[in-house]
């Protein structure tokens, strides 16, 4: 059997029938594109390797569970998983920012420990949660530009290169995304102040 002549879906079928070498062929076929995509966004080889591995663990688990649906190209599905895992990485990194210790810096100077600040923090978290939920309702192109800009801290130039569009198109998508988010906030009576 000449593996290079097999389609992705044929390789998947062979893998699910017990031929585990087919999975290796599938990963080898797409590793350069997936890894390059992740590396371009995170700009750190070790982090990219971790996220690449996490991507294919999720791919394997989904294939084994039988929940993979043959809709469109396999590589597009894998790229979407890689993209989502990369965005999650940035969300987690933002959540747990590390502060450097120094003799001039005392963590307790910056902590405002009171019931008021805890309440305010809970309200702020709820607002952020509401906005993240609304972002999921945006069209794919608009959601992607919001996520890359605000969760991955990419410049519009990098976003344009990453999504293969002009800077003006990336800016336009952001403008439409913000307009759509404002409309959803108004339509759903969401209050965005703590």
Image (cartoon, rainbow, N blue to C red):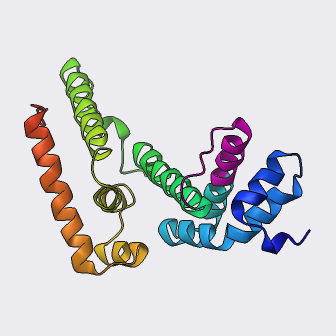
Q: Is residue 189 left or right of residue 88?
A: left
Q: Is residue 12 left or right of residue 80?
A: right
Residue extent of the magenta highlight: 54-72
View extreme (bottom): residue:
166
For the stretch drawn in magenta, the main secondary structure is helix
**Front one among 112 and 180:** 180
**Going 39% across and 72% down the picture, which residue do you hit?**
163
**Front one among 22 and 164:** 22
View extreme (right): residue:
1
Q: Is residue 167 above or below residue 88?
A: below
Q: Quadrant of the N terminus?
A: bottom right
Residue 147 x, y percent position in the rendering: 35, 56
Q: Is residue 51 above or below residue 67?
A: below
Residue 181 x, y percent position in the rendering: 17, 48
Res 193 visible? no
**Front one among 168 and 123:** 168
Residue 66 drawn in magenta: yes
**Going 20% across and 28% down the picture, which residue do you hit?**
120
Residue 25's quadrant in the figure? Answer: bottom right
**Going 15% across and 41% down the picture, which residue do you hit?**
184
Residue 65 x, y percent position in the rendering: 70, 36
Q: Is residue 91 left or right of residue 45?
A: left
Q: Quadrant of the C terminus?
A: top left
Q: Is residue 140 left or right of residue 176?
A: right
């Amino acid at each position: 059997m000449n593996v290079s002549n097999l389609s992705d879906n044929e390789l998947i079928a062979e893998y699910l029938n017990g031929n585990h070498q087919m999975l290796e062929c599938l990963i080898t076929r797409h590793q350069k594109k997936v890894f390059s995509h992740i590396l371009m966004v995170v700009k750190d080889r070790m982090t990219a390797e971790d996220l690449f591995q996490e991507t294919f663990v999720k791919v394997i688990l989904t294939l084994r569970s039988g929940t993979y649906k043959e809709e469109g190209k396999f590589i597009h599905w894998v790229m979407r998983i890689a993209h989502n895992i990369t965005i999650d990485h940035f969300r987690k990194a933002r959540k747990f920012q590390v502060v450097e210790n120094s003799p001039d810096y005392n963590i307790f100077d910056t902590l405002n420990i009171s019931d008021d600040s805890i309440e305010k923090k809970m309200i702020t978290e709820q607002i952020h949660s509401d906005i993240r939920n609304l972002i999921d309702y945006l069209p794919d192109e608009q959601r992607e530009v919001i996520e890359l800009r605000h969760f991955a801290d990419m410049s519009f130039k990098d976003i344009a290169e990453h999504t293969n569009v002009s800077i003006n198109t990336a800016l336009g998508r952001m403008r439409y995304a913000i307009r759509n988010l404002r409309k959803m906030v108004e339509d759903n009576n969401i209050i965005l102040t703590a």
